[in-house]
Amino acid sequence: MKNKQKTLLSFALILAFAILALGVLTNSPAITTFDSTISQSTAKLVTPTNTAFFTVVADLGSPLVAITLTVLLAGYVFYKKDRFLACWIILLQFGGSALTEIIKVTIARPRPSHQIIADTGFSFPSGHTFYTTIFVICLLMVVLPKIPVDSRYYVIIPACTWIILVAFSRFYLRDHYPSDVLASLLLATGLWLRLEGYRDLLHQAATAFLTRRQARTLPSKN
C-alpha cells in the first residue's frame, strides 16, 4: 500500500472512530440500536463451554499480556540490532495505550450491566482489543518481511483470527458494548497507518543524527 493510500485510509478510520465516539457521548439512538442488536444475538450463544473458552481468550488477550508480549518483541528486535524498529514498537504500544486511557477517562462510559466476568473501569474503547491489535500489528511488522509473499497468509489469517476472538470475547462476556470493540479496531488500525507514514522519515532523521554524532566523537587525524 502506497503512502498516499495509507494516509487516506488512516484519516477515514480515525474519522469513523471520532464519529463513533461522538455518538457514544451523545447517546445516539443509532449506537444504542447497534449495541443492543448485536448483544441480543450474542446472548443466544452463551453456554458454559463458550464462556469458559472466551474467558481464557480474554485472559490471554488482556492489556497486561499484550503489553508484556510487545516489550518482549521489542527486546528481541533490539537484540537483533534493529534498534529503531524496537523503539517504534514501544512507541506504538505505549503511545497508543496512553491515548486509549485518556479517551476512556474523557468519555467515561460505564460498562454494561450483568457482566458474565466482572471487570472494572470505563468501557469505551476496549483496552483488550486495542492492545491486542497493536501487538499483532507489531508482530506482523517483524515477521512478514522474513516470509515469502505467497506464504504470508499462513501468518496473517491466524493473526487476524486472534484479534477477532479477543474482540468478540469482550462483548460476549458483557464487559464491553460492541461499539467499544469496533472503536478500538478503528483507532488501533487508523493510528498505526497514520504513524506508519512517518516511520521512514523518522528513521532517516535518526540515522542522520547518529551519523553526525558518531562523526563528532571520532578522533581527528593530524
Image (tube, rainbow, N blue to C red):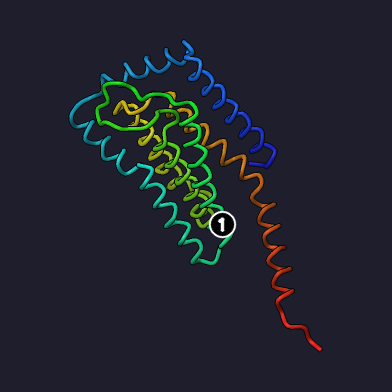
Identify the residue at the far left of this view.
48
Q: Return the residue found at the far bottom.
A: 222
Q: Is residue 107 above or below residue 135?
A: above
In x, y percent, where is residue 46?
23, 24
Splitting the image into 4 quarters, where does residue 174 fall?
Answer: top left
Viewer-closest of 153 and 217: 217
> Which residue is tagged 1?
85
Q: Is mark 1 on a helix, strand or loop?
A: helix
> On the picture, is 218 further left or further right than 100?
right
Give the vertical position of 121 relative to 60 (above or below). Answer: above
Identify residue type, mark 1.
Leu
Residue 73 coordinates in the image, percent (x, y)? 45, 56
- Residue 82 at x, y percent in the picture: 56, 63
The image quarter in which residue 165 lies: top left
Residue at position x 71%, y 63% from top?
A: 209
Residue sitting at the far right: 222
